[in-house]
Image: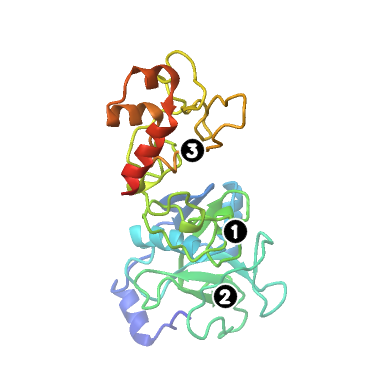
Amino acid sequence: MGRRWSRIDWVLALIGGLAAPLPAQQLLESDTYGLHTYELWAGSLCWADAMDFCVARGGYLATVACDAENEVLADLARASDPCAGDPAPAVWIGFTDLVVEGQFQWITGEPVTYTNWDVNEPNDDICCEEYTNFSCPSHPRFPRWNDERICGTRNVRGWFCELGEPPQLECVDGDGDGFPDGEDNCPAVSNDQADSDEDGAGDVCDACPFDPDDDDDGDGVCGDGDLCGVTRIPEIAVPSLRLGTNRWALLDADNVFDTSTPGGGGPGFVFTTADTAGCSCEQIIAAQGLGQGHLKFGCSISAVQNWMDWINN
C-alpha cells in the first residue's frame, strides 16, 4: 500500500519539498526479453487511460508470468526511477480484480502463473483497489506489487507497456522443473540446472558435460579423453589407394572405423573413436611413425590395437 498524505506532506508539497511528477507520457526506458519489448513510461494517467495508451502503441499494460519477467521491469525502473526517489509512488501493470473481487486476472486473459505481492497485499484497503501497481526502486520491498484505486491518488507515477503476443514464451516451463524455458539450461528435460563445465548447457542434455568445448572436432570423445584435438572425419589422407582387407579408417561420420572384410569370417573386430581416444587412422600413423602401407590401405589390426594398449597404459 502507498502511504496516505499527512499534513506535513501537504505543507511540503506546497513549498516544493516533494519531488514533482515527471512530465506525462515520457518514455524513460525500453528493453527486450524473448520476443517482447517492454517500455517504462512516466506520467500521471489513471489505470484505464494507461491501458488505452499501451493498446494504442500496439501492446498492453505489462503482464508478468515469471520472476525473470518481473526482473525485466525492475531493471527498467532501476535505470530511470519514475518516482524520483520517493518510496510511496509506483507504476501500473495489467493486473486487476475488476471482474471478480479478489480474483486478480491479467488483462490479456493469460493464466496467472506468478505474483509478487507486497506483504499483506492485496488488501483493498481504501475501497475499490482493483488495479495493480509495481513499486519503485526506493520502496523498501521493491519490486513487489500493491493493489490501488483506478487513479491511484498521488501514488502512481507511470506505467509499463508490453509489446508482443501474449503470453511471454520465455516464461513457459515446458518440462515442469520450475525453471522457465527462457532460463532453463535444458528446457526439454526436467533438471536441477547443474552445469559442470559452465557452458550454458545443463549436464542432463550436454553430450560432454565436463567439456566446455563440447567435442568441437566431432569425433564423439569429450574433454581430456580426446588425445587428438583436431580429428578430420571422414579421413582425407587414408587410405590413399584403397581400403584393404582387415584395414581400418574412418570413411564416414559415424565415428566407427570402416574396413573391407575378408571372404571368410574374419577376425570380427569393431573399432570406434571412443576406443582410440578420438584419434583417426592417419593420426595413429603419425603418432607411431608407421609406414606407407598404412597410408595406402588403412591401419592394420595390430596398429590399432597397439595404439589402444598405449593409451590405456
Q: Which mark is residue 149?
A: 2
Name the amino acid type tagged 1. Answer: Val
| 109 relative to 261 in the view: left or right | right
- Contact (Cβ within 8 Å) of mark 1 with mark 2: no
**Residue holding disc 1:** 172
Observer-side mark, 1 or 2, equals 1
Q: Is residue 9 visible?
A: yes
Instruction: Give the class, few, some or many, for how many residues have Cα within 10 Å of label 2's Cα (few <14, many ≥20).
Output: many
**Residue holding disc 3:** 271
Name the amino acid type tagged 2. Answer: Arg
What distance separates the C-alpha of mark 3 from that of mark 1?
A: 44 Å
Sooner in the amino-acid sequence: mark 2 or mark 3: 2
What distance separates the C-alpha of mark 2 from that of mark 3?
A: 74 Å
Tag 3 secondary structure: loop
Residue placed most toward the observer, 293 or 105: 293
Q: Is 251 rendered above or below residue 220?
A: above
Sooner in the amino-acid sequence: mark 3 or mark 1: 1
Observer-side mark, 2 or 3, equals 3
Question: Residue 41 sits in which quadrant?
Answer: bottom left
Q: Position of residue 219 (x, y in %)?
A: 44, 37
Name the amino acid type tagged 3. Answer: Phe
Q: Residue at x 66, y 59 (%)?
A: 108
Q: Residue at x 35, y 38 (%)?
A: 307
Q: Position of residue 116 (x, y in %)?
A: 51, 73
Q: Position of residue 170 (x, y in %)?
A: 54, 55
Q: Residue at x 34, y 48 (%)?
A: 312
Q: Is 68 rendered above or below residue 7?
A: above
Q: Residue reaching furthest front?
A: 264
Instruction: Give the class, few, some or many, for how many residues have Cα within 10 Å of label 3's Cα (few <14, many ≥20).
Output: some
